[in-house]
Amino acid sequence: KKMDTTPENDREEEARKLLPAYLKHMVHHYHDDFYVSRSFDPRLIVQLMSEGFLPIATKGYLLPKLHVERCVLRLHPHSKLHISKSTRKKSKRFSLSINECFDRVVAGCHNQHGINWLFPPIVKAFLAIHLQTMAGSSSVHGDKNNDKSNNNNNNNNNNNTSSNGGSSHRGQGADAILIDETTHQPCGTTAVRVYSVEVWNEETGELAGGELGYSVGGMYTSLTGFSAQDAAGSVQLLALGKLLMKCGFEYWDLGMEMDYKLKIGAELMPRMSFVREVHRSRVQCRDAVLCCEGERMNAKELIDWEPMKSKEISESCSRASSTVAESTCESQEEQEEVVNVDVTDNIGATATVTSSQKTSKKRPHAAN
């Protein structure tokens, strides 16, 4: 019998092979880019995220998706993020925060898009991972026995976010177990973190837009978002792009191809390449965490921020090394001065040490 080798069948075969063996008892290939599972266990969703799947849902089913081509924007070492003049100008009216109001962002997405794929079971799973991102704990539990614990964490987080806007949280997230492809044995863990991103009208204090997203290593994935005010969506998108760069992320995964994503600099990445990059980044860039410095950050200041060029970094490192070397030499001279003082002369020793301390205060600090 002659084998059917049409492109469609080739893609189907590739899709089946991309599902890791250790997940096949819970997840099955459905059709095209989609897989299916009846489980909404946060631990399963964390594993799927760590393997490059984008988890969405329909009523009663989890539908992990692995696009044939993923729309991805490179952020490091050379970003291709494009910012229009009009968005840059409008951005001064807004500010950005991270993890300040997860529930309100979910409500905003529902108000704009309807339930769509954001059904209650997957929202509950995202919230469980989000709470671990906020709390800094690495364990994820989706059962009823932990509802009280999650509520307590939620109350604590609400108390924290009321004082600092939620922007200082650098939680460990939820651990995904890494499985060796050859031995099929655990070989480590990597953190998966779920975030809410908010954009605020600085004049009125209203929530103007936001999104849900997650990170695996240096790959940040946008899940869904909403915009409630003119220009808020564009501002949130581009300010977030700059914040991802500041936080050391390598890639920004924007999901399926759309014109506006290509216009800001995203490119199509074949799924085999995408999965390889997720696997590499989850090990080599595991410490990337999305957070704001201080409270809310002005969107215009974020958009105007530019990373240091390689030449500037080299010059800065040279200046820092030179300053450290000078400080080391001066520190040694101070030690010699003190050692040369007669230890029986308490007054002289005190005077010499005090003199050295006064002199050292006038020297430039290594950070300068």
Image (cartoon, rainbow, N blue to C red):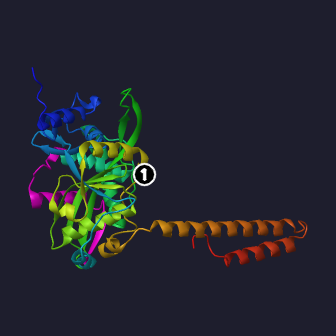
Instruction: Give the image location of residue 29, x and y in percent.
Output: 16, 34
Instruction: Give the image location of residue 160, x and y in percent.
Output: 36, 61
* Mark 1, residue position: 287
- Horizontal placement of 314 versus 109: left or right? right
For residue 165, which quarter of the picture?
bottom left
Give above or below for 192 relative to 160. above
- Quarter of the figure with the N terminus: top left
For residue 95, which quarter of the picture?
bottom left
Rendered residue at 29%/40% (across/down): 51
For residue 211, which quarter of the picture?
bottom left
- Quarter of the figure with the C terminus: bottom right
259 or 62: nearer the viewer: 259
Rendered residue at 40%/39% (across/down): 189
Q: Is residue 287 visible?
A: yes
- Horizontal placement of 223 versus 217: left or right? left
- Horizontal placement of 15 versus 168: left or right? left
Residue 315 magenta: no
What segment carries the magenta color? 93-121
Residue 101 magenta: yes
Give above or below for 292 relative to 351. above
Amino acid type for the residue under numbered disc 1: Asp
Rendered residue at 20%/65% (across/down): 263
Residue farthest top in this picture: 1
Q: Residues within 10 Å of mark 1 (few under 14, many from 20)?
A: some
Rendered residue at 31%/63% (across/down): 80
185 or 95: nearer the viewer: 185
Q: Secondary structure at mark 1?
A: loop
302 or 83: nearer the viewer: 83
Residue farthest front in this picture: 2
Instruction: Give the image location of residue 27, x and y in percent.
Output: 20, 33
Q: Is residue 31 visible?
A: no
